[in-house]
Amino acid sequence: MSRTFARIINFYSRFIGFSLTFILPVVIVVGLALSTFNPANFEGETFFNWVNLVFVGFVFNSFILAFNAILVTLSFDAEVNKLTKEGTPINSAAGFRNLERKYKASNFYLFIISFFALLSWAIFTLSIWGVESVAKFLNLSDSAADSVSMISLYLSVSSMIFTIAAAIAIRIPSISGLKVGTMVRYYVVSRHPYVLESLFSDSIYTLLDPITRVYFIK
């Protein structure tokens, strides 16, 4: 059951969630741009409630991607442990370490996306519904409050741009690609040839007479 759930989350992250990371910020930015350049048609609580709903979907999608990163990490570790128990020389598998570095880098960017998505939504919420409270607390004029609102809105959009930039740099790993059978293709022997060579030479060395052994050492 847990394995099926992890695959569903991974499928969503790879084929739906990753695309929404680009689509939802564009929808939000276009909506805010329209409200700025044509305020007559996009004013009021209803419009900003719709934008906020898209924002919440953006944040929720980002957290699903981050959760998928945790599942990928657990899946990778489980498969490596399984290979180790089966006797595969995992310590010399340079390909596995390379794969691990790649998915850890992607996971790092996914957590960055989640952080900036949450930060962007928090600043947006503050700029729309919390500026008046801040202005009263700091005793600001109406013009100063409007300036704070606009600055907060720009900071919110800037945070979304960071999420898009981070998304460009990632590739979400497939959990199904971390199975034992598929992971074997990443296996690259790095140390065992020398171990086998040493074992082979030691075996011959013990069979030689003292004179021949000297020449063998040379």
Image (tube, rainbow, N blue to C red):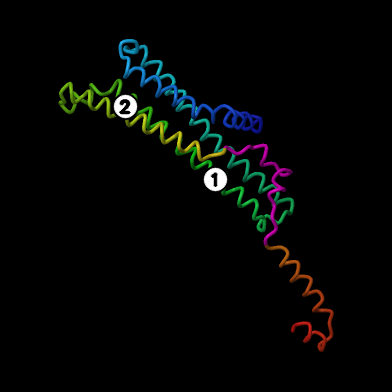
Tell which of 18 and 59 is nearer to you: 18
Position of 202 relative to 25 (above/below): below
Instruction: Tell me the number on the disc at residue 104.
Output: 1
Looking at the rendering, in which quadrant would you find the N terminus? top right
Residue that label 2 marks: 153
Q: Quadrant of residue 189?
A: bottom right
Number of residues whose C-alpha sits closer than 10 Å to that of mark 2, classed few (under 14), some (14–19) or many (20 or more):
many
Q: Quadrant of residue 92?
A: bottom right
> Within the magenta stretch, is there residue 188?
yes
Number of residues whose C-alpha sits closer than 10 Å to that of mark 1, classed few (under 14), some (14–19) or many (20 or more):
some
Amino acid type at circle 2 is Leu
Q: Quadrant of residue 121?
A: top left
Seen as rendered, the residue at the extreme front is 37
Question: Which residue is depicted at the point 71% across and 51% down?
Answer: 85
Position of 167 relative to 82 (above/below): above
Q: Secondary structure at mark 2?
A: helix
Report whether 188 appears left or right of 206.
left
Amino acid type at circle 1 is Lys
Q: Which residues are magenta?
A: 172-190
In the image, residue 24 lies at what x, y percent?
47, 24
Looking at the rendering, in which quadrant would you find the C terminus? bottom right
- Disc 2 vs disc 1: which is toward the camera? 2
Report whether 203 appears left or right of 76.
right
Tell which of 38 and 155 is nearer to you: 38
Distance CA(mark 2)–CA(mark 1): 32 Å
Q: Secondary structure at mark 1?
A: helix
Position of 183 relative to 44 (above/below): below
In the image, residue 159 lies at what x, y percent?
38, 33
Question: Which residue is depicted at the point 45% across and 28% down?
Answer: 59
